[in-house]
Image: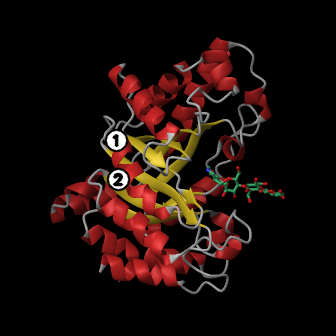
Amino acid sequence: SSINQLIKNRGKGYFGTATDRGLLQREKNAAIINANFGQVTPENSMKWQSLNPSQGQYNWGDADYLVDFAQQNGKSIRGHTLVWHSQLPQWVANINNADTLRQVIRTHVSTVVGRYKGKIRAWVSLWSWLLDVPHEIYADICQDVVNEIFNEDGTLRSSVFSRLLGEEFVSIAFRAAREADPACRLYINDYNLDRSGASKVNLMRYYVDKWISEGVPIDGIGTQTHLSAGGGAAVQGALQQLATAAVTEVAITELDIANAPTSDYNAVVQGCLNTPKCYGITVWGISDKDSWRTGANPLLFDSNFNPKAAYNSIVTLLS
Ligand code: G3I
């Protein structure tokens, strides 16, 4: 059985992976995703720089390819990412007027979310109703609305967004996304949320609760989970702390672990199983040869696309 089916049997939504057109078109990536994973995240193609490098011009080719692949193969999608200080086109970084920036954020968010609205929901939900599997009704595209907006000390990271708008940009982005697709679950995503008691974990909870109480439509917290070897054991505690925020779900969104120890991967998967709000796990790529962490061999398939010990141990754990 695939790790996606196995984790669904345990009541979770998906086991997913990051990918994109270039990867899907070569070697065994598409075959492995089809056989093993239930959700895809665009590794780069839905970033602002990729979609909208100059004002008024959208390049949809790579993102559409990913969405078409998902639809044809029954995968759900986590859109990634609407508002991020990195991979941001220069024309946006150069904006120096708050009103202009408000409008630019709203336009970008509603353009992207609106384009993919309901793409997956239409047929997945039909089957869900017939089969009476309530979780699957929500197997729509969901979005990382804001990504990596905090410094380690809990202040907002300096970016054109925070400089011109302060924390208002968060509310603008989430409200525009909710309006564009009310069924899409909306996430705030960040890294270094891997240990309970870590400063960013506390801050994340504080801000998410504050913003939700102000009416900002945040549904979930994504924890990227880029770990060093030995980092797996602390993840469950962090997930459970994040889950005390007033969100409906949390998710592990970009998992990779240096040298992929089986004990670490098992601990992370077990941490999600033990956290009722943990909706799913996404690993950040298929093969070690394509990982952004060059030389770290942090993924579940080796450079020849063979499953590693960590993959097999997850199968055993979930079975
Ligand atoms: O597509 C261009 C290509 O045309 C050009 O020739 C080449 C030369 O550098 O660059 C290519 O773009 C690269 C792109 O990946 C696609 O391969 C960028 O340089 C490179 O910076 C980019 O890296 C991505 C990185 O985000 C960008 O910040 C990684 O693939 C991607 O794995 C990584 O993912 C991030 C998440 O979005 C957020 N969390 C952290 C995570 C890891 O950094």
Identify the coloring.
secondary structure
Q: Secondary structure at mark 2?
A: helix
Q: Pointer 1 and pointer 2: residues touching (CB < 8 Å)?
A: yes
Q: Which mark is residue 132?
A: none
* Vertical relation: 106 (above or below) 122: above
Figure label count: 2
Badge 2: few (under 14), some or many (20 or more) residues near its Cα, within 10 Å?
many
Q: Secondary structure at mark 1?
A: loop
Q: Is residue 90 left or right of residue 220?
A: right
Q: Is residue 51 left or right of residue 138?
A: right
* In-front residue for pair 241/292: 241
Residue at image coords 25%, 56% = 135
Badge 1: few (under 14), some or many (20 or more) residues near its Cα, within 10 Å?
some
Q: Position of residue 283 (x, y in %)?
A: 52, 64
The answer to whether residue 13 shows anywhere in this view is no
* Vertical relation: 296 (above or below) 254: below
Q: Position of residue 178 (x, y in %)?
A: 40, 32
| Quarter placement of the N terminus | bottom left
* Vertical relation: 268 (above or below) 26: above
Disc 2 under 8 Å from ligand 1? The reply is no
* In-front residue for pair 293/113: 293
Q: Which residue is tagged 2?
A: 121
Q: Position of residue 318 (x, y in %)?
A: 32, 76
Query: Residue flagged by tag 1: what amino acid is it?
Result: Ala
**Quadrant of the displayed image that contains ligand 1:** bottom right
* Vertical relation: 270 (above or below) 196: below
* In-front residue for pair 65/105: 105
Q: Which residue is tagged 1?
A: 183
